[in-house]
Structure formats: C-alpha cells, structure tokens
Image (cartoon, coloured by chain):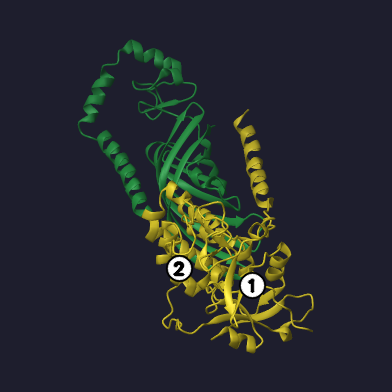
Amino acid sequence: MRVRRCVFVVSLIGYAALAHRTAEASPLEPPMAEAAVDEIPATNAEPEEEATGVDATADPTTPRAVEGCNAACESTCECRKGINVTPYKNLILLNFGSTLAGRIELEYERALHRIVSIFGGAYAVAFDSLGNENLVGFGIEVGTRVFVLGRAPEGIWFAGTVGMFWRNPRGNRSVKTRGLETGLLVGWTGVWGRFALSLGAGATYNYGRVSVLGQSVGDSEFNPLFKIGIGVAF
Amino acid sequence: MTVFGLGRVAIPGLFALIAVFACNAPPLFPEPPADANSRFEGLEPESYTLFGRPNEDGVSSECCMPSCPFEEDGEAHVWTAPVYTPQDMETLYWDWELVTPWPVFAGNEFRPPLDPPDPRVPWVCAVVPRPELRNDSEAPMPYDLVDYPSREAAEAAGAMVTHRGRCGACSSLRNLAIYIAYPDLTEPIRECALVGIFDSSFSRLACIASLGFDLPCAQAWDFNTTNTQKKCISVCGGPKKRKKPANIDYECGPGKFVPTDINLVSDCLACDELFSLEIFRTAAGRSRRGSGLPSPICRRCEGVERIEHFYRMPEP
C-alpha cells in the first residue's frame, strides 16, 4: 500500500517535470520568446550589460542579463538563458523529511556539471518522537542528482542513492541491525541568495539483517522516503 | 558564521548527538511496584475472581487479583503468584543457557505447524538441566527444553515445568525473565509497531528484540504485531480506541457476568486474540496465563497454570 502511494507521488512529480519541460520546448513558445526579446528597448539592454560587465556579443554561451532575470540579485545569482541561477556549486542541507520517524540528515551536495551533482550525507534516527526511547539509528548515503530542469544544484531533479544503515538499541549491545539501502527520488531544489530549500520524495529498497545473541535473520522491503531540506549554498 | 564554520559545528554536533543516544542505557530489570501484592492482602478470591494485577482501569482489586482458588485432594486452596525481584529476573536471564537455541523463522515468517498438537493432551514445556555440559562453575547452567504430555510426567522425569503447552520460540528462561520484567507488553510492542510504520520492519524487529527477547521470540511477537495491524486496523486504529483500557468494566459477583476470554478485554485486544493468538501461541509456546504470570489484563483462573519460576540448580 505504502509502495503504491509512493509510486503515485513519484509519477506525479515526474509527470509535472516532464509537462513543464514539454511546455518549454513547445513550438508555440520560441516565437513568443523571441518577440519578447525583440521588444526589449536598446536603452534597457546596454545598462544591464554594463552592470554584469559581460559582452554578450563576444560569446553566446556567456551568461548575460536578458528579460526575465532580476537585476537586483546580480551579486547572488547568474542569468542564464533568461533565468536567474545560483552561482554556487555547493550545498549543505539539513533534511527533516522523515522527522516523523525522528530522522535528521546532514547532507553535502556539489554540482559537477550543468545537469549533474553528487551528494553524501549521514543521518541519525532518534525514535523518541514515536515514544520509543530505546532505539536509535544511524545511516550514511551517497548519491547523484540529474537535473531535468534548471542547473545543478538548483532545479527539478531525479536522484539515485546507495547507503548503509544501522538500528541499535541504547545500551543493549546484543541486538544489532544493519543493512543496505538503495533509493530513487524525484524532487526540486531552490536557492535564494545563500538560502537553499530542497524537497524530494521517492522509495528505497532495503536489505537488512537483524542479529541477536549470535542468531540473525535477513529480510528486504520497499519503504517510502521523503526529504525536506533547508540549508546554505556556497 | 561562515558556511565552513557551520559545518565545523554541525558535523561534530551530529556525532555528539549519536554518542548521547548510544550511551544512555535504560535498566533491563525494573523493581516491581512496592504494592505489587500487598494491595490485595485481606481479599479472598472467589470462583468469579479473575487472575491479574490490574491498573486503575475498569476492574477493581476485589474482582481481579494475582491469586486463584483451587481444589486439591478435596480441600480448597488459594494460589498467589509470587512477586519476582530484579535478582530473580537476572538469575533467569544470565544464570541459565539453552543448549540448542530455538531456530529463527526463515524469512521472518512462520506458518501454523502441519501437525498441530492434540488439544486434549495437557502438554507442558519443562526445563531439564544439563550439568554435564557445564565446563566452568561460573558459566551459566546449560539446559534443554523438553515437551512432556503432562505435568506429572515432567515432574516424574525430574524436569521443572516452565509453562503449559508445547515448547516454542519464547519458552527459554531468558524470554521468561522479559515476560516478568514487562507485566504489560502491549504498550512497548505498540511503540515498536509505530517504529515499523514510520521507519522499517527491521527497526520494528530490533525494537522488539531490544526489550530483551532472543531473535525467534522477537520474530513471534513481530508476526503477532504485523498480523494484528493488518486484521484489526479498523478496531484498533484511532487514538481513542488505542487509549481505551485493555480491561472492560467488570462487576464481579455471583450471577452478574459470565466472562469469556474475548468479552473480558477491549475490542482491540479481542480482535488481536481472535486473529493472532493461536498462531502466536503455536510459535511462541509461552503465554502469561500458561506461565502463571499475572498481567494488568485480567483473565479467568481456569486458564492459569500455577507455576513459580524458581529453578533449582542441580548439585555439583
């Protein structure tokens, strides 16, 4: 049931991202955009070019200010293809997505390419929020994000992760739980100045092994995963 | 604070948090309440009295106490379940060791046995010490768990009965110590079920095992929990229903109310017993009633086995 709900959410977000992209590439769009650019008064364009200090005619790939970009953010953003993007390549995020289960994650992300970033994180799970003071959990994960809209580390993305987890009772060393986790998520990251917000949802496939006093048993399952992260860009 | 400064604080902070979580250990065996049995002193159990040690919910001490009347050799007697100290529980947990641990349930599942035990045979599970396997006098005493067709047969063979019914995953003395330490497992197991919903089934199993159970017994409880979640969600679902006392109101007295196993407890527990109890008992072996252990949930005396869990070590 949980898996089905999760697949639905993932599909919905994926569909929204694709629909947005399709709309951008729509044959109706370019003439309208071009018309808008044509309408920019020359008197407006020159000061913006001066403000950014970039000669747009020298290199067409160089960022330049055009309509749609907010000139006020020039110190904290770059204008690429008419969209403000963050000039920062690194994010540190504190993820609260699974806080209902007491899970808090510290994550570092670095953009490697226009559409690719890698990230790694560590999380702790304090089950106190569920009234269980006896169990604690830890985990580490690494992953990569592929941006289908925007420019890494900002935009709509799909992510793949692999990680390890441990769930152990406090003070009871006879019980050990560890396992491997792999997941697929879809989400969005926005950066405003140095403030970053990231939202994601997906599913993980976990293989875990519980050991108690020399006996152990393994099992696997799918679980939903939600990430709501806030952090800083640099 | 710069971004790097934040990292320098946050990362060690996370590890410090982890260290605090890992080092804060709760005591394994709590002291029993001071009035565990004393509040029932002076009360005489009658034929309609239930067996249990109720909290303040629905059942008065006159109607439910840790004692049962019984007849032996034509004489009326009263048996009262002992109050076990933390030392008693530690002895059960640490001083005895099952020679062949109960096997884990493969795939974390179990099914009813193909040849269920004949209910007409009064099976008991008994402890048979194996001093010849003990290498060191400081080491725990090895023992086997053996099924006998009756209590008399077990006692005649020199075995010490530990519960009614055939042996199962929770029959070991180590698990018995945990049954005693937690007179009411409903709440801790429910917390573990929540962990399972929000985190993973591994966490749920680890949570149950962390109460002190060995792995097969934890699996039996885990199955019970998941099965009840599936079958009884409509009955146990809402917070109001969950908070409802386990016992129903019981006005005891001759001819007032004829209790059964099902109508004595709340709807949620009744549902649990209807759908999960039989398969759980088959897997776990041990039950509170079958072990003579009172719990806050009151039960009829007919189902209670009079057993006191003080196992004597064989002479060297």
Tell me residue B279's x, y (percent). Answer: 44, 71
Rendered colour, chain A: green
Rendered colour, chain B: yellow
Label 1 sits on what residue type?
Leu
* Marks 2/1: CA–CA distance: 21 Å
Mark closer to the chain start, 2 or 1 = 1
Q: Can residue B213 be seen in this view?
A: no
- Kindly report which numbered mark, 2 or 1, lies closer to the viewer in this rendering: 2
The front one of B172 and A229 is B172
Tell me residue A50's x, y (percent). Answer: 43, 15
The front one of A84 and A216 is A216
Q: Residue furthest left?
A: A28
Q: Mark 2 points at which residue?
A: B277
Residue at horizontal 57 percent and vertical 54 percent from the top: B55
Q: Is residue B86 left or right of residue B3?
A: right
Local secondary structure at mark 2: helix
Local secondary structure at mark 1: helix
Q: Is residue A205 left or right of residue B45?
A: left
Q: Is residue A11 visible?
A: yes
The front one of B115 and B53 is B53
Residue at horizontal 52 percent and vertical 78 percent from the top: B165
Task: Give the answer, above or below, for where A58 lies relative to B146.
Answer: above
Q: Name the residue under label 1.
A: B173
Q: Image quadrant of residue A36?
A: top left
Q: Mark 2 lies on which chain?
A: B
